[in-house]
């Protein structure tokens, strides 16, 4: 699983209305990380920044949530 997919899964699972904090996303991903993978913080931060730049995530203060456009794309892809 890529870091971006892990971030999306963490935000979906946490279901915070105002967005999930970076610390909460990181803890959720580390708890669900396979034992054969090593945590790479730089890759995690890069995935967050690129997701915001691509419009997949919305940054609210120090929290992140999924953008409405990304949710719509995901629903369309599931059909």
Image (cartoon, rainbow, N blue to C red):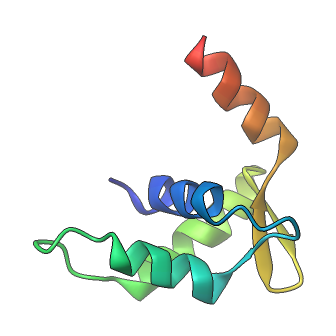
In percent of width and height, residue 44 lies at 48, 76
The one nearer the camera, 1 or 50, is: 1
Q: Residue at x 62, y 70 (%)?
A: 48
| Total numbered labels | 0
On the image, which quarter does residue 65 sit in?
Answer: bottom right
Instruction: Tell me: residue 22, above or below residue 74.
Output: below
Residue at the extreme left: 36
Q: Residue at x 14, y 74 (%)?
A: 35
In percent of width and height, residue 64 lies at 76, 70
In percent of width and height, residue 23 lies at 60, 89
Instruction: Tell me: residue 76, above or below residue 14.
Output: above
- Image quadrant occupied by the C terminus: top right
Residue at the extreme top: 79
Q: With 66 as the anchor, is 39 left or right in this view?
A: left
In percent of width and height, residue 78 lies at 57, 19
On the image, which quarter does residue 19 sit in?
Answer: bottom right
On the image, which quarter does residue 53 sit in?
Answer: bottom right
Q: Residue at x 74, y 62 (%)?
A: 52
């Amino acid at each position: 699983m890529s870091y971006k997919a892990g971030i999306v899964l963490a935000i979906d699972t946490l279901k915070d209305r105002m967005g999930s904090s970076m610390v909460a996303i990181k803890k959720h991903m580390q708890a669900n990380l396979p034992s054969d993978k090593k945590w790479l913080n730089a890759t995690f931060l890069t995935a967050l920044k690129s997701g915001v730049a691509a419009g997949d995530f919305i940054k609210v203060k120090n929290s992140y949530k999924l953008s409405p456009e990304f949710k719509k794309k995901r629903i369309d892809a599931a059909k």
